[in-house]
Amino acid sequence: MHRYANPARFLRIARVATPIVTLLGLALTAAGLWIGLFASPPDYQQGESVRIMYVHVPAAWLGSGGYLSLAIASAAALIWRHPLATIAARAIAPAGAAFTAICLVSGSLWGKPTWGTYWVWDARLTSMLVLLFLYLGYLALSASEAEKGGEQRGAAILALVGVINLPIIKYSVEWWNTLHQGSSISVVNATSKIAPELLTPLLLSVAGFSFLFSAIVLMRMRAMLAQQRVDARSRRMAEALA
Amino acid sequence: MKAKHQRLWLVVGALVALGGAGALAFSTLGEKATYFYAPSDLAKGPAPTDHIRLGGMVEKGSLQRNGATIHFVVTDMAKTVPVTYTGILPDLFREGQGVIAEGRIDPATGSFTADTILAKHDEKYMPPEVAGAMKKTGAVSSGG
């Protein structure tokens, strides 16, 4: 684990991995969305609006899964003080925030024809909005700490505290009466209440979105490491000139 | 003990404390975070007189249309509440499906007057042909 946390080694692996992950993500997302939007049947109740699910569900999973990886990276940064962990956390946060926003917007567009409303303050919708605010808070705090040149400990602690929201999001539909429906897919029991014709494009786009998420994180980490080297070099040059 | 082990235990301890605080907060929050009352919840205590949400299934065969006004019965398979509503209904509103009605309950008659109706969707997704076949065998109840 620590072996791969070496920035030079990471960059060597990331240089090869980035194009592969990006292409896999684009291909799987294209396949999932093509089948989902054009080559799959409508739902018996919702009709055509069920197709929003092929964007909404992967975005929701990556929004919350992204937060878990942000928290793990932040814990690693706090405990082992490894600079690559902080860079990973800062690379994950905007991608996670974007996927969470996509989840909220697509869900809202699905809610109007299905439920009859764009938004309600039930436990699932509210906790997902809180997740977006946690991401935005992390982004603001880490940006201000980076500007001061600090170790980003405050942002890492914020990321860890926010983890408590993840089980709330997951179990909100079981703990309380919500307008949002319960889970259709149980990963633990490997069961699903979605018919196979609708499940196939969903799983394809979940895989595609996951690779795209990883691609964004890899690209951002490489860009941030490159930026660090540029900053260090221009500092050295300024010192040499002085 | 090395410094990084100390930090590891500090983070683990902080997360456990946070989890405990969260669990305490949520045990107090309890039913207050619930989005709607089921008919059985209303039957338990004195009927609330403020604006509330009532959720459950639209009982089969209970829907009556009278111009733009509709009457139906919300059931949670244990208790029922009669509901009256005037206005536009969401597409998914139908007998045998989940519904959430916002409005007030008349303490005298126990009937509910709704000003907003939301359709609740369940977690099952399937193509119409499958639903049709399952309806024939009685495996699924569809009001559509």
Image: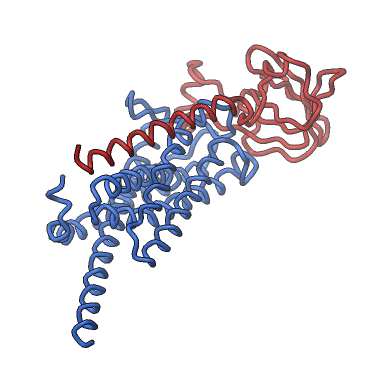
Chain colours: A blue, B red
The N terminus of chain B lies in quadrant: top left
Which residue is depicted at the point 27% across and 66% down? A223
The quarter of the rendered structure image containing the C terminus of chain B is top right
Pinpoint residue A62: horizontal percent, then vertical percent. Answer: 37, 46
- In the image, farthest residue toward the right: B108
**Which residue is at 59% across, 34% downward?**
A179
In the current view of this chain or complex, which residue is farthest to the top?
A: B78
Q: In the picture shown, does residue A87 fall above or below A58? A: below
Give the residue furthest to the bottom.
A241
Q: Is residue B126 left or right of residue B59?
A: left
Does residue A39 appear in this view?
no
Q: Is residue A23 left or right of residue A121?
A: left
Q: Nearer the viewer, residue A45 or B110?
A: B110
Residue A240 in which image quadrant: bottom left
Residue A103: x, y in percent? 47, 48
- Residue A184 place in picture, x, y as percent: 44, 30
Counting from the top left corner in percent of width and height, residue B104 is at 80, 29
Q: Nearer the viewer, residue A81 or A34?
A: A81
Q: Is residue A141 visible?
A: yes
Up-down: is A155 above or below A190? below
**Placement of A36 over or under B59, stated as above or below:** below
Give left or right: position of B22 versus B2: right
Q: Residue at x 70, y 30 (%)?
A: B53
Write down the quadrant of residue B116 in the picture: top right
Count of marks overlaid on the render: 0
